[in-house]
Amino acid sequence: MEKHFELTDKVFKNQFTQCTLNPEIFSHEAHLRLAWIMINDHGIEQAEKKIHTQLQYFVEFVGAKDKYNKTLTIVATKAVNHFMNQSKSDNFKDFIVEFPQLKTNFKQLIDNHYSFDIFNSEKAKTEFLAPDILTFD
């Protein structure tokens, strides 16, 4: 089990937004959990805005600004929302078990929506590039 699960949703979110979360536990799964929490707390539109803004602060604070990708951040949030709309889970642990492809096949899942590589695109790092093959509804 990943270390971020040692924190409650509230503590995890608060530590992230206050930039006190240990960056070593902020894994891909922790990113997904943050999206899940923010969507539950604020709805998809506000979650996208808050995650984008707060993740920029967090990566700058921990010295990883070069790793930030705006497109990937927003699309990951949209993907979590897409699966949340189909989910029967009321907590993130059950949600990620219900939809393991978000964790284990994430790159392939995202690649199905784009005809180009958003993971290594300089443009995708600084602006949102909408999916050109398949949208997240």
Image: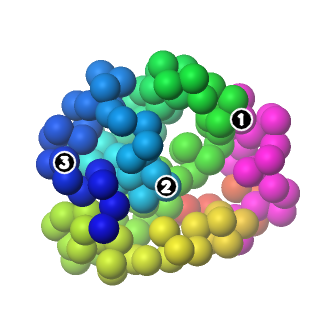
> Could you classify mark 2 by the number of other residues whose Cα lies within 10 Å: few (under 14), some (14-19), or many (20 or more)?
few
Left/right of residue 41 with respect to residue 62 in the rendered view: left
Helix, strand or loop status at disc 2 = helix
The reply to whether dot 3 and dot 2 touch (C-beta < 8 Å) is: no
Q: Position of residue 124 (x, y in %)?
A: 74, 39
Left/right of residue 11 with respect to residue 130 in the rendered view: left
In the image, residue 114 lies in the stretch drawn in magenta: yes
Occupied quadrant, residue 24: top left
Name the residue tied to disc 2: 28
Residue 69 appearing in the image: yes
Name the residue tied to disc 3: 7
The amino acid type of the residue labelled 1 equals Lys
Q: Position of residue 65 (x, y in %)?
A: 62, 26
The segment highlighted magenta reads: 112-130
Inter-mark Cα distance, 3 to 2: 16 Å
Name the residue tied to disc 1: 125
